[in-house]
Structure formats: C-alpha cells, structure tokens
Image (cartoon, rainbow, N blue to C red):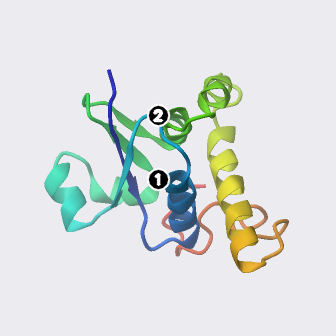
C-alpha cells in the first residue's frame, strides 16, 4: 500500500515548478513530497536512478519501492490528489495515457495565469509545449 510519493521534478523548468506548486496546493489523499531531480538530495535518496533520466521527465518514487515515469508518473500524481482519482483512472486507459501530463500542465498554466494575469490560452504548457522554457531537458 502506497502511503507517500516523492516527485522528482526539474527545478530549472518554469512549467515544472508551476506544476509542482499546483500539485502541492491540492488536497492530497497520499502525501506528495517534492525533491529537485538531479539534486544532491535526490542522488542520496535514490542512487539507483539516473539523474539525467529524472531531469528528462518527471519521476515519482512510491514508499513501497515503485518507480513511475512519464505518463504513469503524471497519473499517479493525479491519483494522489483528493477529487482526482476518477480522472486518474480514466486517464490510465491506454489511449488516454498521454493526456495525463497535458491535464497537469494545463491546470498548472491556468493557476499561473490566475496568479500573474497571463492569458491562459497562451500560457506555458498550452501553446509552447511542456517545459519549453527549460532549455529542452523536458520530454514533451
């Protein structure tokens, strides 16, 4: 049984930081802890994970030893949130899996738009693509 998830995210990516803030601001059924991917802390905790891979795409480590990357990582993040388990279950269907990261990116961009007045239709992650401001290290 999973009781805690650690999200390794690219702290150098504006959209990753915004997605992290959005996830952290939601009520959580399973606590999410955030650690910068590639950091000394991440390397100490997870020496078997390739830091370059964790910077290329979100990686989530469960306290039961499970490691989730890419679409699976986004889905488990949604699954951890109160009110999002049904959506996570729907997005787990094979044809909808790639949509999970877009849902989080869009929610994060909308939150950012509300905070800084940016037009939500052209906010990061909507027209530019996930992580377009991170120097190309993100995988979408």
The residue wearing badge 2 is 29
Q: Residue 2 lies in what quarter of the image?
A: top left
| Residue 118 horizontal/vertical position (percent) | 78, 77
Which image quarter: residue 38? bottom left
> Residue 99 appears at what percent x and percent y?
69, 40
Point out the frontmost of discs 1 and 2: 2
Question: Residue at (31%, 30%) from the top-left corner?
Answer: 66
Task: Indicate the position of residue 81 as horizontal and vertical percent values.
Answer: 54, 38
Q: Of 114 and 119, which appears nearest the observer?
A: 114
**In the drawing, does residue 96 fall left or right of residue 56?**
right
Cα distance in 3D space between marks 1 and 2: 24 Å
In the rendered structure, find residue 57 and report the number of the disc placed on it: 1
Looking at the rendered structure, the secondary structure element under dot 2 is loop
Write the residue at 64% across / 40% down. 100
In the picture, the quarter occupied by the C terminus is: bottom right
Q: Residues within 10 Å of mark 1 (few under 14, many from 20)?
A: many
Q: Secondary structure at mark 1?
A: loop
Looking at the image, which is closer to me, 115 or 123?
Answer: 115
Report crowding for label 2: few under 14, some 14 to 19, many 20 or more residues within 10 A (C-alpha).
Answer: some
Residue 113 or residue 8, whichever sits in front: 113
Residue 8 seen in this snapshot: yes
* Mark 1 vs 2: CB contact within 8 A: no
Residue at the front extreme of this rendering:
27
Quick check: 120 above or below 75? below
Q: Position of residue 126 (x, y in %)?
A: 76, 61
């Amino acid at each position: 049984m999973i009781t805690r998830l650690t999200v390794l995210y690219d702290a150098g990516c504006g959209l990753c930081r915004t997605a992290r803030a959005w996830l952290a601001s939601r009520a959580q059924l399973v606590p999410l802890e955030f650690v910068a991917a590639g950091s000394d802390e991440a390397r100490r905790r997870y020496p078997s994970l390739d830091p370059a891979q964790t910077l290329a795409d979100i990686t989530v480590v469960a306290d039961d030893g499970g490691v989730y990357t890419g679409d699976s990582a986004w889905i488990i993040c949604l699954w951890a949130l109160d009110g999002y388990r049904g959506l996570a279950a729907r997005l787990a269907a094979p044809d909808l899996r790639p949509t999970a990261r877009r849902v989080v990116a869009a929610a994060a961009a909308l939150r950012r738009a509300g905070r800084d007045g940016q037009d939500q239709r052209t906010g990061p992650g909507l027209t530019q693509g996930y992580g377009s401001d991170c120097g190309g290290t993100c995988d979408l």
